[in-house]
Image: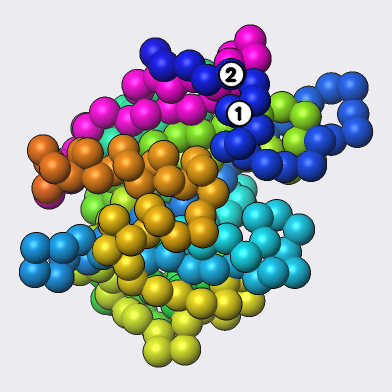
Amino acid sequence: MDGMTKVEVDRIERGVIAPRDRPIRPRDAATLILLDRKGDKILVLMGRRHASHAFMPGKFVFPGGRTDPADSRIPTATALHRDEEAKLLAGPGRTSTIRARAIALSAIRETYEEAGLLIGQKGAFATDVSDWQGFVEHGVMPSLDRLRFVARAITPPNRVRRFDTRFFSAWRDDVAVELPDGGPTNELEELVWLPLADARQADIPDITRSVLEELEKRLAHDPLLNPGGSVPFYRLIRNRFTREIL
C-alpha cells in the first residue's frame, strides 16, 4: 500500500470544501478509457470539459458520469466476464452483482451520451429507459464482456461532489456505431484521440494522470488487457491518500 499526505490529496482532487459537519456520501460513477492501436502506438479518447462547468472546468477527461439506478434494468448481449465481476465486487462497500452491472453499463451509456460511441453488438434492442433510446434507434445491444475494470478512486471527504468512480477500459474495435456528430449531451466540447504519452501531458486531473500511468504499465506486460488484471484503488484513509490493489 502506498500513501500520500493530506496536502498531496488536495493536489489530486481540487474540489471545493463542503460546508458540512459530515462528509457527503460518494455516489457511484463510471468512466470509460477507450483505446485504439495505431501502428506501435496506443491512442486514448479524451474530451475537454466546458470552462463553465463547476466541476473540473476546462480539464481533459474520459467520458463518464454518475450511475443511474435504471441502468441495472438494461438488457445486454453479453454479461461481464466473471473475473471482472469478481474485481468489482471486491473492496469496501456492499457492491451486489446488480449494482456492479449497473455501474459497468453506466460507463457504456456515458460514452454514447458524451462521445457518440455505442459499444455493443448490432441487432434488435428494446428498452423503455429514456437514456438508452440511442441504442434502440441505432440497433445496438450493449455488451459487457469486453469491458476491463482497470482502476477505482473515491473522492476525498469534505468535497462538494464526491464519487466512487470505477474506471473501465475497452478497445475502439468494440464500438458498434460511431456517430459523426458526437453524443447528444453537451458535456464535452472537444474530443481527441491522443497517444498515451501525450495524454499524460495534457491538462488533466491528477487522478486521471495516475490512472493513465497505471494503465500504461499494465499494457506493457498485458497488451491485450486480459480479464482479471490487478486493479489499483485510491482512497483516503486516516488523512492519507492510499493506493491498494483489488
- For the residue labelled by badge 2, is the local secondary structure a helix, a strand or a loop? loop
The type of residue carrying mark 2 is Thr
**Label 1 environment density (alpha carbons within 10 Å; few <14, some 14–19, many ≥20):** many
Q: Residue at x 22, y 39 (%)?
A: 217
Q: Are marks 2 and 1 in contact (CB under 8 Å)?
A: yes
- For the residue labelled by badge 1, is the local secondary structure a helix, a strand or a loop? helix
Residue found farthest to the top? 238
Residue 101 among magenta residues: no
Q: Is residue 49 above or below residue 21?
A: below
Q: Residue at x 14, y 70 (%)?
A: 38
Coordinates of residue 51 in the picture (x, y in percent): 69, 69
Coordinates of residue 119 in the picture (x, y in percent): 33, 66
Q: Is residue 226 above or below residue 201?
A: above
Residue at image mark 2: 5
Coordinates of residue 244 in the picture (x, y in percent): 40, 19
Left or right of 2 in this view: 40: left
Q: Would residue 136 be visible to someone looking at this image?
A: no
Give the position of the N terminus as an image quadrant.
top left
Magenta region: 224-246
Q: Would residue 4 be visible to someone looking at this image?
A: yes
Color style of the picture: rainbow
Residue at image mark 1: 9
The type of residue carrying mark 1 is Val
Q: Residue at x 35, y 22 (%)?
A: 246
Residue found farthest to the bottom? 180
Give the CA distance from mark 2 to mark 1.
Answer: 6 Å
Q: Residue at x 33, y 61 (%)?
A: 198
Q: Which mark is residue 93?
A: none
Nearer to me, 67 or 207: 207
Quarter of image, res 120? bottom left
Q: Is residue 215 above or below residue 91?
A: below
